[in-house]
Image (spheres, coloured by chain):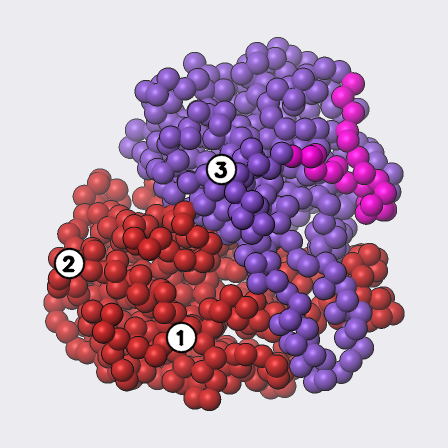
Chain colours: A red, B purple
Amino acid sequence: MKDHLGRPLVAVTGIGIVTPLAWGREANWSAVKAGTSGISRIRRFPVDKLRTTIAGTVELPEETAGGEIVSSPVRVERMAAAAVEEALAQAALGAEGAFPGPLMVGMPPVEYEWPQRFDLARRANGNGSYRAAIEVATGREDLYETFLFGGVGERLAARFGTTGAPIALTTACATGASAIQMAVESIQRGESDAAIALGADGSVQPEAVIRFSLLSALTARNEEPTKASRPFEKTRDGFVMSEGAAALVLESLEHATKRGATVLGILSGCGERADNFHRTRSNPDGSAIIRAMRNAIDDAGLQPGDIGYVNAHGTGTPENDKMETLGMRAVFGDAPPPISSNKSMIGHTLSAAGAIEAAFSLLTIRDQVLPPTINHNEPDPAITLDVVPNVAREVSGLRHVLSNSFGFGGQNVCLVVSAAP
Amino acid sequence: MTRKDVVITGIGLVSSLGEGPDTHWEVLSKPGAAPVLDEAAFAPYAVHPLPALNLDTQIPKKGDQRQMEPWQRLGTYAAGLAIDQAGARGLVSDMHLIVAAGGGERDIAVDEAVATALCTTPPAEAGPILNEKLGTELRPTLFLAQLSNLLAGNISIVHGVTGSSRTFMGEEQAAADAVRIAAARLAEGRGGIALVGGAYVSQRWDLVLLYGAGGACWRGPFAPVSARTGAGGFVGGALGAFLVLETAEHAAARGATPLARLAGVACDATHRRAGGASAAAAKALHAKLGAPAGAGLGVISGMTGVAEARAEEDAFLASLGSAAVRRTGSLIGHGVEATFPANVALGALALSRGGFYPAMDPADAGDGPVERILVTGFGQWRGEALALLERAA
């Protein structure tokens, strides 16, 4: 019930997943195992004059029915709530609306979007100045509570009855993994027997697409959206923005065992290391991502040779995949384990990615199936890794998976997910 | 698990009153300190403006300065001050970092021009024009200056802090939890030294718009936090505040002098504030910290001036007996994510100087000497937090 450092082992007893492929864990996992792409042409807003016109999007039912397009915080909250609901239903822990532990919310920064700005300017008789907007926005508690950074977490915490203050956090593309790490630490520290960790992102709106595009981070392979995300492949030229959420119910193994819960896996190691090289690029020596991977493996009390599969960060940018390869070879030597990128199918779900990929890592162990890296037509001679090209692979005896998350701003987090003891 | 003692060995503090511990002690330890205000630029909202900073002293590369806007510069600057005071430049590679962040700056001119030009255009027509305008008029680097986690990223790049890096979001509460978790990780042996804090730039239209919409900003001529009538509100204060936390043994081993001992931090967030819920939550947190009260206790209150929160905090403060209460918001304003670490810094400063502050607000009562300091943090909307500081051994 304790790990090699004498800390409580942390079990996963519930998993919930939302991605462009589906609302729901099993539907997502089936689609991923089948190598299905969830990337499509953006339909949510006009894409004229955009360099990139594709993304993975998660529409809310009322949007699909023709209703108004919601803002990012609303989408994040809805997807997050669905993921938590699903995870809680599986874990069967706590009474309705009374979860016995804290909530860690990995999510993107949120702010007024253009529909809100235009609406305020219309109410100010066409005056788009901030001064005018401030006058007409006075008393708009709806705007305030929607766009406060603490708003989403507060509403989720109230709904699920989690304890203490919810913690919303961001470490860019490592956010989901950071949220899990925070929950694991809180259980290890003995603050609580259980915790909910979630990562969610719903940033496909014009300004966010343009901003990532201006950083030259996105692929513009718009013609065949399902073929656009090409992690580790020779012709890769950027990532595809996407949306989604995943939630994990975590509890001490002792707590889970005592109540007879089904243990889906163990969150056995977390490692992090910040990079100080550049705002959007890793140090060319790979030192920070190598340390993050090693720290996670050490934290789990394992050796690199114990890791049977790696769920890649694998964004499909030329830079990331090259650096991740360098890190893999540095950590694992000449015989690295297979590695694949879910982002080839669901795109880069940004703040959700670390949580979604940890969830898929658990299912990988459960079913002993490695999800594929799709769109792998032309191998890159510089990528000296087994990327499980195009087709899922059945394995046996897989016990430990490393899940990598590397963020803009140099925030790197790796998790080790292990089979139930 | 044995919990290690955690001490504060460095504070980095910038406010409208100036920068550094000496300046703040000089101004705040004497009666009659007056706030620095700009009541015109954002009228009817007053702000406590950012002082002039010699950025080159903490952000030596102009290229780094150019990659940031005022918010990230202020935070990076204050973080550097904290590292310097702790004498911890040589320890940054394994220093852990937690930043409490809001959003960075937007391009106000572009926002206003686009909103004016397109607000009445039908969405189907406006969309393509919006795409074209944003694609040509937004500076690529502004995205990085706006991203919340890039304050931490810049602290890593400029100061070399690379042990770990996390950014919490959620206004006042995020900062209190940042301090709580940074300290808890040290106490349980996850590293020996950490940097934690936040920054707030008060002179920003976008923030007045965000917080003003909820009625959280004080409208009208300046008044101290206790005297803001009606629904009250906060007066934004430029504030950069970082703390270097260490385990006592780590500090002792390198001969660093602690400013104060961080005896505990406790946080909660009630879902309904009024009617005593928030005061009751604070009482429970207070009990967790051993219920310090009475003579010898100083309170550094982060009271914002928002009336609903103020009523709850007043009820809580009334239970502390003859403790000496100081409402710092009346002199330095409210700096959202920076306020809790700033008040912890002011508490550590007072303990390290062996004194306390005279009244800062007409409602401030009680007097020193002070042996322990309780820092309060009732968020403008949600969140209750307390920290307890003691004189370093």
**Is the residue A211 above or below the residue B346 in the image?**
below
Residue extent of the magenta highlight: B32-53
Dominant SS in magenta: loop
Q: How far apart are labels 1 and 3 at the CA level?
A: 37 Å
Residue type at numbered disc 3 = Val
Q: Is residue A120 left or right of residue A202?
A: right
**x%, y% of residue B133?**
68, 73
**Is the residue A124 above or below the residue B267 in the image?**
below
Q: Which mark is residue A333?
A: 2
Residue marked by disc 3: B196
Residue marked by disc 1: A237
Residue type at numbered disc 2 = Gly
Give the total of numbered labels.
Answer: 3
Dividing the picture into quadrants, the one containing residue A384 is bottom left
Q: How far apart are labels 3 and 2 at the CA level?
A: 36 Å
Q: Is residue B35 magenta?
A: yes
Circle 2 chain: A
